[in-house]
Amino acid sequence: MPKIEVDSRAFFEFVGRRLEGDQFEQILTVAKAELDSSEDPVLKIELNDTNRPDLWSTAGLARQLRIYLTGAIPKYRFFSTPEERLDFSGRTIEVDPNLREIRPYIAGFAVAGKSLDEAELKDLIQTQEKLCWNYGRKRQSIAMGVYRHESMKYPVHYRAAHPDNTNFVPLGMDRPLSLRKILSEHPKGRDFGWIVEGFDAFPFLTDDTGDVLSFPPVINSAKLGAVEVGDTDLFIELTGTDIDSLLTATSIVACDLADSGFTILPVATRYSYDTKYGREIIAPFYFQRPISVDVDYGSRLLGLEFTTEEAVAAVAKMGCRAKAEGKKISVTVPEYRNDFLHAVDVVEDMMMGRGLGAFEPIQPGDFTVGRLTEIEVLARRVKNTMVGLGYQEMIFNYLGSRKDYVERMRTSGEELVRIANPMSENYEYVRSSIIPELLGAEAVSANAAYPHSIFEVGKVSRLDPGDTNGTVTRDYLGFLHSDRSADFNSVRSHVAVLFYYLSIEHMMRESEDPRFITGRCAEVFVANERVGVVGEVHPQVLENWGIQMPCSVCELDLTIFL
């Protein structure tokens, strides 16, 4: 969950009053936040709602508390809408058509009217980091840059640049590097270069004179991108791959700076290709649509009776303007929020606006007796049997790499479930077998006395086009025996003992599997249904893992036994 640090003086100035002790901690629940620590003048606050990125800043969190305490909802008059376009006075961004398949969207605005103090600069940097890391998926879908506005000349050009022929001095360095060299030689390039390195051209941002703003989403230039305390005119841009998230993040930053006393100056982005909001978008841009909810529906969900007037008042305390329409209320979504996906999201604001203290605790009306699930009962029987056979229980990660699950195992990997946004390649796939985990443990256990006998009971998941979800998750048993004498018969005897104590009839049929030695592998069947595989691990697989001792393994689908 996001954790922010705020200057207490600036924070309570935004709130409009100073809050102390229990009163402060209680009011934080309105934003699903809690005080982590207080070391004057710094407050460390943890936010427990990832759907509200507008709260991840000093101004944003204070805004929510101020609205709840005073009922005064701020009005931001610098937003364009699909129906009303504000004057942007020649401030434009021109978008290269070649960026459509690389990093297609950009939004920006300028600010003026006051100088940036130290607390505001720190908070702006923190907002940038939190939005881009958490909400922007480590800059993959949103990245943000801040620049000195007075040194720029419009239009700004957002173009696709050749990675080897385009050079500039990146922030934190004193010599020019090509875009490609930045990926390997600059710390930010090594951190975020993976986002663009697979493309033939890289995103590049310059003003009309050719002065470089940045290489998004990696690093700003040292000339225009080095913002300091005392700067008065700023240009803020955000690039990304999802236009709604990008425009929401732009609105959040604009509202924060407006609350800090800056004047927001709209900037128009002109695309050479179609977007869902047209080819010219003036940011900050308000695109959200009203959402309605039946008040009776909300009352039933919450177990507390609301009138339409009470519902309107409750959501207003959360910053939402609303009006009654018969038995429904129609809510106008705040400019800085885009988390209303369903009527139930309005009901949640009704609950938060009324206050959690309004809901009295109720004892459960039904008496139930807890019990273990069938699969857990079976799993415990299996574990007891395996321990009795001399095996040691292991617990492994459910995520791993393609190298471990495919390349080392000599399999195709067609059934593997891939994570869309992995933290690293080591946690990119959901395991479809326990065997790679067992071999991984054996690979680092060569110094332990033999024989080695280990097992795990856990879940595996694989793609299944026939399932409504596209994947199936099953409970599996996997066990490994490693010794000089480990062979098919040694692990086969353990399989027989396991089935004997489970009182289940089984049979085996010889099979071919690239993970095992030909002729020393068999499929296990129960009532003519395949439940697993047993065999001697292929020497090439052992070599891939760096294992020098023979290994025999078995893997069984326990779900089928039920």
Image: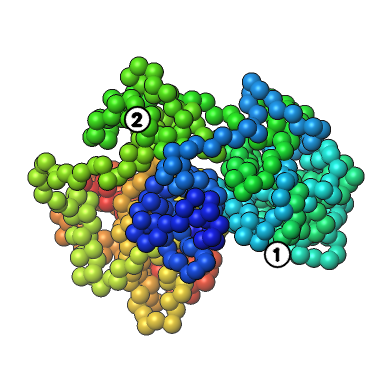
Residue at image position (11%, 41%) is: 365
Q: Is residue 85 above or below residue 392?
A: above
Q: What amino acid type should be assigned to the residue bearing mark 1?
A: Pro
Task: Identify which residue, 413 or 183, lies in the foreground.
Answer: 183
The one nearer the camera, 299 or 141, is: 299
Q: Percent from the top left, x then y, of residue 478?
A: 34, 60
Left or right? Give the position of 350 relative to 87: left
Q: Residue 354, image x and y in percent?
A: 32, 39
Discs 2, 1 touching: Cβ within 8 Å: no
Q: Position of residue 68 (x, y in %)?
A: 42, 43
**Is residue 157 positioned above or below 234 on the image?**
above
> Residue 119: x and y, percent?
62, 60
Query: Which residue position is annotated with label 1?
Result: 187
Residue type marked 2: Ala
Near mark 1 (Cα within 10 A), the count class, few <14, some 14-19 or many ≥20, is some
- The mark found on residue 366 in the picture is none
Q: Farthest right residue? A: 209
List the residue tagged with mark 2: 311
Left or right, 215 with respect to 397, comes to: right
Residue lying at 75% horizontally and 55% vertically, measured from the top left: 231
Earlier-in-chain disc, 2 versus 1: 1
Q: Is 88 or 14 nearer to us in this picture?
A: 14
